[in-house]
Image: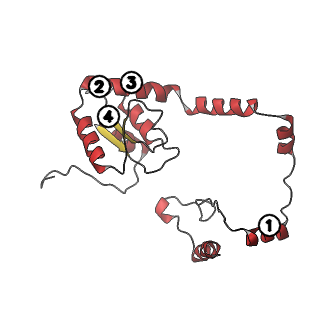
Amino acid sequence: GVADYSPIHYSTTELTWNELCALYHIADVCLVTPLRDGLNLTSHEYIVCQNNKPNGPGVLILSEFAGASQSLSGAVRINPWNSEQMVQAINAALLMSPQERATKHEHNFAYVTSNTSDVWAKAFLDELSAGETTDATDALHKAPKKIDMELLHHKYRNSKKRVFFLDYDGTLVAIASKPHLAVPTDKMLDIIRKLASD
């Protein structure tokens, strides 16, 4: 950058949905670069907001570790650990011809608009119903067995390897309006330390 121009604007303020959509719409390139990811809709939101832009759609650069990486064939895929590859991808995206940008966007837009949350939910429920058995149905209607705490304690003490799956937001910490406010208490941290040190 120079004195009167900065190419990067880093914002930590919470944006309204309209403000976020406006930023998605004007962006020439969108980088979604998680190192690991599950369900991340940022790339989908960007694609929808890029549709019908007067100067043509922008380019989505997507981490190969993103959940959407295999679905969005029009994205430029990168390894976020490889900074040189990322630089080359940004440069290629900025220099890409309008025709190539449009083609990539059409692929992505077709996928996003035909694979909505309603379609996903219906497919999920259909598969769930298809796998249903009498035993499984009966099991759903039975109350779970009471845990034998003595047996659980014995198994825990004698196990050599243990894995803990802990939900964070709403379990280890109270649900907060902003992520930075979701901080575990000292008591909770002490409990986790004791579990980890045993």
Please name the residue that numbered disc 3 is placed on.
106
**Spot occupied by residue 166 in the image (x, y as percentages of width and height):** 63, 61
Q: Nearer the viewer, mark 3 or mark 1?
A: 1
For disc 2, the neighbor class at 10 Å (few under 14, some 14 to 19, many from 20) is: some
Q: CA distance from mark 3 to mark 2?
A: 10 Å
Please name the residue that numbered disc 2 is placed on.
100
**Which mark is first along the chain, 1 or 2?**
2
Q: Is residue 27 visible?
A: no
Are the residues flagged by discs 3 and 4 in contact, CB closer than 8 Å? no
**Spot occupied by residue 62 in the image (x, y as percentages of width and height):** 39, 40
**Spot occupied by residue 114 in the image (x, y as percentages of width and height):** 51, 25
- What amino acid is at disc 1? Leu
SS class, disc 1: helix
**Which mark is first along the chain, 1 or 3?**
3
**Which mark is first along the chain, 2 or 3?**
2
- What amino acid is at disc 2? Glu
- What amino acid is at disc 3? Glu
Indicate left or right for 126 with 173 as reference: right
For disc 1, the neighbor class at 10 Å (few under 14, some 14 to 19, many from 20) is: few
**Which mark is first along the chain, 4 or 3?**
4
Question: For residue 59, which numbered disc appears in the image?
Answer: 4
Please name the residue that numbered disc 1 is placed on.
152
**Which mark is first along the chain, 1 or 4?**
4
